[in-house]
Image: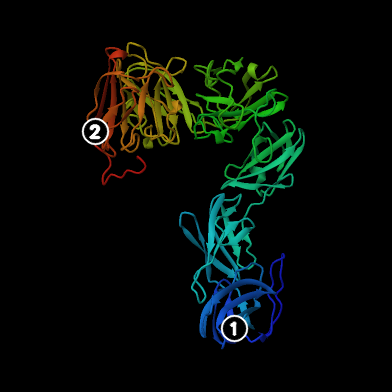
Amino acid sequence: MKKYLFIAVAALLAFAACKNEEVPTGEGPEMTVVCDESALMGDLFKFKVTLQDNVPLSTLKAELLFDQTVVSEITKRTARNGTYEDGLEIPFYKDIPDGVATVRFTAQNTNFAKTIQNKDVSVSRPDFEYLSLKTATGHTYDMTRESRNVYSLEGSFGASFEAKIVTPMFGESKRKIEFGYGATGVEVGAEGYLPFASTQTDYKITFNTLTFEASPFTTITVNGTAATMANKTTFAAVVDLTKGQTVTIEGLSDIADWTADPDFLEKQSAGSYKFLTLDGKYKINISLSDKYFLVERMANDTDYATLNADGSGAVWMIGGPCYGKPAIFSASWKTDKGLCFAEVEPQIHQITFVAGDQLATSSIDVKLFHQKDWGGEFGSSAVISTDSELITVGASDGNIHLAPGVLLDMGGLYRFTLDLTGGNDHAVLHFAKVGQNEVVSDKITFAGTEMTMTSATTYQAVLNLAQGQNLEVSGIADISNWTIDPDFFEVVSAGSYKFLPISGYYKIVANTETKFFLVESCLENGAPATLADDGSGAVWMIGGACYGKPEIFEGGWNTDLGLCLSQITPKVHQITLIAGKQISADKVGVKFFHQKGWGGEFGENAYATVDDGGLIAVDAAKGDISLKGGVTLEYGAPYRFTIDLTEGVAAAKLKFEKAGESQVSGAKVVVNGT
């Protein structure tokens, strides 16, 4: 066999050829080696060694050398003469070509006399027929062999895709090699999953078993600083920026389609932006899924900036599912969803939203904080004042809401500006419309009134409706596919409904995504109605993630998700929910309130009588309603809460009952309460 030196790359080990030779040291043991002349990287190199000596034996060591460096070894105790069998692990290093390695056998007796014998072994990289991508959930996808060492798979993987790469079983030991993601990138046996990422959803994943090169891994730089992967769909780079500086983002093939937070970055050309805020350290968050650059102020490379005593630094907005960038967040009051204001001038902080896309048009519930977390806040002892007629700020809690009856213009640009020049204890919040985006909306009419577009998927109208009135809906092509709320409507025909509650003002919200009309009792100006002491007005249900219309809400105990009961006859309020779809079949936690929010409630000893139907339990001290122990509602069947207030709120009568038969055939399945 021809012997030659391996050529190393990137400071990795190389193989070197050695001659077969026996090097005695003193009166060492007589040694005979039988082993394979070839082996595969990643496999087990097996050998047999026979030892004979008049002096008691001690040890046998086998060492695998790549260019004079030991890369694998094993030592065996040899108490007596005889034959010893074992194997050496052959490492699966990258960038090492096929060639000849050396196995050094050293036998030693109890007099410390040694015999050394070297053997050549031809080592080659396995040539696999295929490789497999294995996800954390156990799904596998086979990669096709394109050429020696090169494998690929094309598909629709989304903006990011995490997987390990696994070989089929090979060699004498019938083992597999698993490639993961470690500190140096792709590594054999690493615990992490390879974070494949692309700006496209359809792409080709490749891997080279010689070089360990894998693709695609998105490499994005901000002013030359490499962005690191923050999660499956987001990269981030922390950079020092000065006001007016050009920010250059490279590595995104479709960057012309991306948008940036306009409070911080002004687009000059594709990938080039003017920085608008004060000098400092900032994190540029790069969302592959949203194609959006979100900016946050930093104290250092790892810690977010906070508000300083003089009003400089960072201000953060946290709140319910009514705000967000680049789109309204679905999560409620999550600190990781805090948005940073831009300090455009010393102690002047601003944040701008597009109504309907980034800020709810009809209901806002947010608060301003000194950090991207709970702690210092503009509330309680440090309350914000405002000169805007569009919003209100809680005098005690500092929560920011739309003023009663206010509906923001769909597509309107609205800006919060927090002025701290007078000190943090004298904060002044301005809120105003500063622009308007063009909006393309459907012309949907409800009972003859054109509905106002309030988001990309919602339209609303405030109407004075009469009990028993027939209502016509137009402008919805697939109206026959919509579902209705049986507490408020009775279907006459497709797009024609009979109104069931008592006469009054109601806000109707049409959701083109869920194909559902949500109804709320309201005042003439559209503000949510409240409950009067005599039992008239409105009753609201708020609770955990166990109820909702048209389906169970994800958010728990969120006042924005309060449902209005239908006042089907004067002072008698009801709500009907389908078990497993609109109310959990096995776990309920709800409560009734006097308004769509905290305040008056059906709390301690609120009900004069409770007809629980053997199904629910009412906490006498709190008024919270849950299912009785062991009770499971019939999946698909409607269940109804009725609150009778004909004798006044103080004499409330609560009833819960099954209101019909299940519309679902087959076995009932309950998963995570649904």
Residue 264 place in picture, x, y as percent: 69, 33
Query: Does residue 7 lie above or below 615 as drawn?
Result: below
**Mark 2–mark 1 CB contact (< 8 Å):** no
Residue 258 place in picture, x, y as percent: 64, 42
Q: For residue 411, which numbered disc appears in the image?
A: none
Q: Which image quarter holds the N terminus?
A: bottom right
Which residue in the structure is indicated by mark 1?
Answer: 37
**Separation of marks 2 and 1 at Cα, in angstroms:** 80 Å
Query: Does residue 311 lie above or below 336 as drawn?
Result: above
Which residue in the structure is indicated by mark 2?
Answer: 660
Q: How is the image coloured?
A: rainbow
Would you call the spot at circle 2 few (<14 residues within 10 Å), some (14-19), or many (20 or more)? few
Secondary structure beneath disc 1?
loop
Would residue 420 be found to the left or right of residue 165 on screen?
A: right
Q: Nearer the viewer, residue 544 or 460?
A: 544
Q: Residue furthest top?
A: 534
Would residue 147 be found to the left or right of residue 500 on screen?
A: right
Q: Which image quarter holds the C terminus?
A: top left
Instruction: Tell me which amino acid carries mark 1.
Output: Glu
Residue 425 place in picture, x, y as percent: 64, 17
Residue 257 place in picture, x, y as percent: 64, 43
Q: Nearer the viewer, residue 538 or 618?
A: 618
**Can residue 325 be seen from the camera position used here?**
yes
Point 67% across, 39% down: residue: 283
Instruction: Tell me which amino acid carries mark 2.
Output: Gly
